[in-house]
Amino acid sequence: MAANKRKAKATQESLHRIFTIPEAPDSTLGAIEKEMSQNLAGFLGNHIVATDKPLTEIEKDFDCSSIPEDPSFVSDHMRHLLDKLVSQSVHTSSPSFIGHMTSALPYFILPLSKLMVGLNQNLVKVETSKAFTPLERQVLGMMHRLVYQDTEPFYDEWMHSANHSLGAFCSGGTVANITALWVARNNLLKPDGDFKGIAKSGLFKALTHYGYNGLAILVSERGHYSLKKSADILGIGEESVVAIPTDEYNKIDCDKLRKKCEELEAKKIKVLSIVGVAGTTETGNVDPLDDMADIAQEFSCNFHVDAAWGGATLLSNKYRGILKGIERADSVTIDAHKQMYVPMGAGLVVFKNPEAVASIEHHAEYILRKGSKDLGSHTLEGSRPGMAMLVYASLHIISRPGYELLINHSIEKANYFADLIDAHEDFELITRPELCLLTYRFAPKVIQEYLSRANEAEQDKINGLLHKLTKFIQKRQRENGKSFVSRTRIEVSRYQGKKILVFRVVLANPLTSKEILSDILAEQCELASESVSFLPELLDICQA
């Protein structure tokens, strides 16, 4: 037991070190690297941005549309970037930046990124990415196995097969979702007899051939906006994305999902895909994936899981069960640039059936020849960088147990913060974390007591004022630059399902401490007291 504790402590200390960059070389570029680092002694100190310079002023630094006629020295241009760009960039690595799904990066990412850029491999074609191609296929195999838990013989057969693919790397969750639904559409409306399939014949002929009056994508009302983009691009229209109501825990209502499937079937509108959400953008909740898989099976339709945020939870043996049922999905989206701590531009989709991607296969004489192992024959994007190398390196350097520690700490830290908010009489916890997201708002005890006994009209009036107060606090906190939380509007069942404005927090940065969380609440209390318009009026109404 003591040995296990020592090992766990050593692992934790090791992970903390990899998120704190060491001293950089003494050079102009090295100085910029240091100042761009996660080290709080760097260019922004404890602030989210160096100054509160408005965006309109920053735009003046970049208002010249003429390409320079005279070249600059590299050192001079680096200093220009440092003064005009770096100093006004958002310090997303700061432990007090807890408002979005962008976090600190391990220090080893910077030198590895230099290597990746220097090699300048193009992953569309083996001829431009000889070693990177099998590396990417291996990473897709690792992520596929993380989701589907298949055994080694499966990967021996499929991982490096020229005519199959376990998935596709792409720039992010949006392209991953588009790719998944593109594959689903083409497999649904596949060649049949004299019909050449949707890829060659188009949507109208495909629907006519199969006797459908339309297609639909079903997802909870918490579904990501990229699904509407997908419907637009795939030619079925944004209106074909049907939002299914959620329960009080922000999870899709499966009874209403089944009923909607029945309604659509009666109208001869085919359900193209049921999309489960594993980590909603606003609240971090996970749909009942097992139940959704049953419904998809019942209605013979594709089942896709958008796990862009929550997919990394599979790395934790302790919390993997939250995503129970994901292994039944036909395809799964995961963003490595979220909870896998890789830079922006690293998303992926994996397919349960390696043969599914044949429906989108493309070839060209000068590139992507038939029979080759070119990755571009099964991807939406053509030329793209070797981001899989950074995922490959991170999986080896951090390892699964290291990722588990990071995931566990994030979830448990979110629960700690939720308890802290709940215990504070001046705050109202809106959604409890299931992963590491939560929402809350400033609402002193007297206001919460008034709301609990108020009628609907009275609640609307108070919530309207709280809306303005929340916006005031969030904006002022961002301008102060010491910390950052985001804000969003969500339906809340205890307020008749009406939307209210709330603070939204994402606790993925391993350097965010309990002290920082306490300071953030203290700052919000202080800012609320500075409101001369909203808080006094609220208190007067509630105390009357």
Image (cartoon, grey):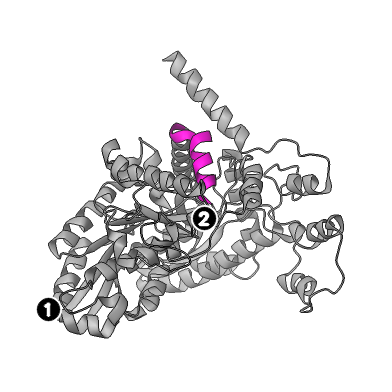
Q: Looking at this view, is 443 or 518 the one in front? A: 518
Residue 83 lies in what quarter of the image? bottom right
Q: Looking at this view, is 102 or 158 the one in front? A: 158
Residue 42 lies in what quarter of the image? top right
How packed mark 2 is, by other alpha carbons closer than 10 Å (few <14, some 14-19, many 20 or more), is: some
User: Which secondary structure, mark 2?
Assistant: helix
How packed mark 1 is, by other alpha carbons closer than 10 Å (few <14, some 14-19, many 20 or more), is: few
Classify the position of the N terminus by image quarter. Answer: top left
Residue 234's place in the image compared with 90, above or below, is below
Q: Looking at this view, is 406 or 473 the one in front? A: 406
Residue 304's place in the image compared with 231, above or below, is above
Specify whether residue 14 is in view: yes
Q: Nearer the viewer, mark 1 or mark 2?
A: 2
Numbered label tally = 2
Residue 328's place in the image compared with 10, above or below, is below
User: Which secondary structure, mark 1?
Assistant: helix
* Residue 266 tag number: 1
Within the magenta stretch, is there residue 523?
A: no
Q: Please provide the residue range marked out in magenta.
A: 387-401
Amino acid marked by disc 2: Glu
Residues at badges 1 and 2 in contact (C-beta under 8 Å)? no
Residue 434 falls left or right of residue 468 = left
Amino acid marked by disc 1: Ala
In percent of width and height, residue 116 lies at 61, 49
* Residue 127 tag number: 2
Residue 319 falls left or right of residue 531 = left
User: Residue drawn at (17%, 66%), measured in percent from left and top?
Assistant: 258
